[in-house]
């Protein structure tokens, strides 16, 4: 008897429906075709043990299973349940009348219990697109998949529940999630708050500007000056994610299996990889491509602590994603694209010892050591960072103050108001939502300068020997400063403040 059951394969952040054809005929043998990898090929052992332990069995006949389309590689153990149900249906051990209305995925343990899978959200989205009525998958993935409406998501704990469901002995109750209600209920109050930071008012102002315009920022200062503390609090002043952004972010995290039992992700991601990270782990890729840290930071913050300690080639592969806001990974047979619209926050010591030009420091660095240390960061990469700011240690008087600083919630209100101005400005442009995303053409349109502002910028460009890209960065930042002040025109004051935030372009740093 020939039976068709349906599963799904995830490529990039999208899913493709896989048709599993099970044919049972006279003879002996188990033949699995359709480009399965080692984990899929080994499924027969898991299926056999799981069925035996639940009083069912593999039929002692010739079993041929084809996974179509046959030219797409099937990987992972998530097809165990699909194959097992197909075998039971083809051998008349379960009722298969309505099996074509179901998309089925799950990894089997030897006792028949179901282990969670990766990519439940993209699979659910594809199942709805393809017109399936039901999705059966492990219970741990049910909340995540139930985000998708117009699809009944059935979360099962073991294969026996699935068998009983098809035989009408005991139906699996669908998992229901009111996505909008859950989303708005969970818009969070931050764990890390700017009110914890003593002093550093100018740096907080800088972080507010970066958050308002989505600008990349680098913090330069000696050890203990508060760089990491400030960076960790940046997500707390970013506007709450929209429902669309939350779905997009959850989809990426789902592909790498980081959303078990969570459902929709509500907080903006904050990723802080160690400086020993490889190119592939940062950008994504591998033999079977997976998203890297920059895609996991999509709609959130990527924090690179001690930037010069990262390998130069690792930092260089970030140049294109910083510009294009996505990552394309090409292989001989396919190409996948991952979104990577993140805010880069980097920190660094000003010298190997950490104390550059500090007369009180017991350790100093020679000019050669300084040059070698700073040369790890290329000029083109620094050009892509809009704001460079020096962080100085907080004096004892500020540290011992009882008075708390301004809270993240208050700062977030101003940032959100500024973002709303930008959303209105860019409403006719696709994929442009805030100032940092402006193209050169949009900069010319929305960052018009008065003669006084132009003269000030010209002087700064000549004295600091800035590149054309740095010129654009200054205009973008000054546009954000004007938006925070709720002003239509960019004034000389806005330009002057934006020029201050190009510390590394000044003589004495990389010269």
Image (spheres, rainbow, N blue to C red):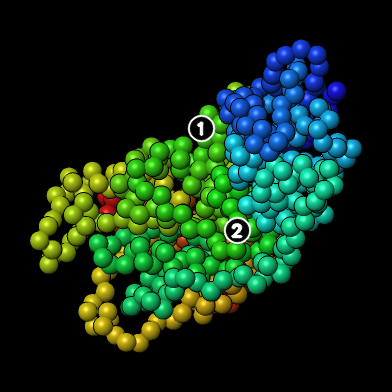
Q: Residue furthest top?
A: 27
- Position of 338 compared to 504: left or right? right
* Residue 303, quarter of the rendered image: bottom left
**Quadrant where the N terminus is found in the figure:** top right
Please rate how many residues cluster around mark 2, counting C-alpha atoms within 10 Å: few if below 14, some from 14 to 19, many from 20: some
Closer to the camera, 433 or 266?
266
Res 348 seen here: yes
Taking the image as shown, residue 402 lies to the left or right of residue 260, namely: left
Q: Residue furthest bottom?
A: 403
Q: Residue furthest left?
A: 362
Quadrant position of residue 16: top right
Q: Compare residues 446 and 87 and report the one nearer the observer.
A: 87
Residue 98, given in percent of the width and then of the height, sits at 88, 40
The answer to whether residue 248 is visible is no
Q: Which residue is mark 1?
A: 286
- Is disc 1 surrounded by few (<14), some (14 to 19) or many (20+) residues within 10 Å? few
Which of the 4 image quadrants contains residue 105? top right
């Amino acid at each position: 008897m020939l039976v068709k059951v349906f599963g799904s394969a995830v490529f990039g952040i999208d899913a493709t429906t896989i048709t599993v054809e099970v044919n049972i005929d006279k003879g002996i043998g188990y033949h699995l075709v359709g480009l399965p990898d080692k984990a899929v090929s080994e499924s027969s052992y898991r299926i056999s043990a799981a069925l035996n332990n639940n009083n069912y069995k593999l039929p002692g006949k010739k079993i041929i299973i084809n996974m179509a389309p046959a030219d797409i590689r099937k990987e992972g153990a998530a097809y165990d349940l699909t194959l097992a149900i197909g075998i039971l249906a083809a051998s008349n051990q379960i009722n298969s009348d309505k099996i074509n209305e179901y998309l089925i995925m799950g990894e089997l343990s030897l006792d028949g219990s179901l282990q969670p899978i990766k990519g439940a959200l993209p699979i659910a989205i594809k199942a709805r697109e393809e017109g399936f009525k039901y999705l059966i998958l492990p219970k741990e993935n049910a909340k995540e998949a139930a985000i998708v409406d117009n699809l009944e998501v059935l979360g099962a704990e073991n294969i026996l529940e699935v068998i009983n469901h098809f035989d009408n002995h005991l139906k699996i109750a669908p998992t229901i999630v009111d996505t909008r209600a859950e989303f708005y209920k969970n818009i969070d109050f931050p764990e890390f708050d700017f009110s914890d930071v003593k002093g550093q008012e100018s740096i907080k102002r800088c972080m507010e500007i970066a958050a308002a315009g989505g600008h990349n920022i680098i913090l330069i200062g000696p050890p203990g000056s508060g760089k990491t503390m400030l960076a960790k609090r940046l997500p707390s002043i970013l506007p709450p994610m929209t429902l669309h952004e939350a779905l997009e972010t959850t989809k990426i995290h789902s592909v790498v299996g980081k959303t078990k039992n969570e459902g929709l992700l509500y907080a903006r991601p904050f990723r802080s990889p160690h400086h020993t990270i490889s190119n592939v782990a940062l950008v994504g890729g591998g033999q079977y491509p997976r998203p890297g840290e920059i895609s996991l930071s999509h709609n959130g913050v990527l924090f690179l602590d001690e930037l010069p300690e990262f390998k130069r080639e690792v930092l260089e592969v970030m140049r294109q994603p910083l510009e294009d806001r996505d990552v394309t990974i090409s292989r001989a047979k396919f190409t996948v694209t991952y979104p990577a619209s993140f805010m880069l926050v980097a920190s660094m010591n000003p010298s190997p010892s950490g104390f550059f030009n500090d007369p009180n420091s017991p350790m100093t660095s020679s000019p050669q050591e300084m040059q070698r240390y700073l040369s790890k960061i290329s000029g083109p990469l620094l050009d892509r960072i809009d704001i460079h700011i020096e962080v100085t240690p907080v004096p004892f008087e500020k540290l011992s103050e009882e008075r708390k600083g301004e809270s993240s919630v208050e700062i977030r209100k101003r940032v959100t108001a500024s973002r709303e101005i930008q959303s209105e400005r860019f409403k006719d442009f696709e994929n442009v939502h805030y100032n940092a995303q402006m193209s050169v053409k949009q900069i010319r349109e929305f960052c018009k300068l008065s003669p006084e502002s132009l003269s000030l910028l010209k002087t700064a460009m000549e004295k600091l020997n800035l590149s054309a890209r740095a010129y654009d960065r200054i205009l973008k930042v000054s546009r954000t400063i004007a938006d925070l002040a709720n002003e239509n025109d960019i004034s000389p004051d806005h330009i002057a403040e934006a020029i201050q935030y190009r510390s590394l372009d000044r003589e004495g740093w990389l010269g």
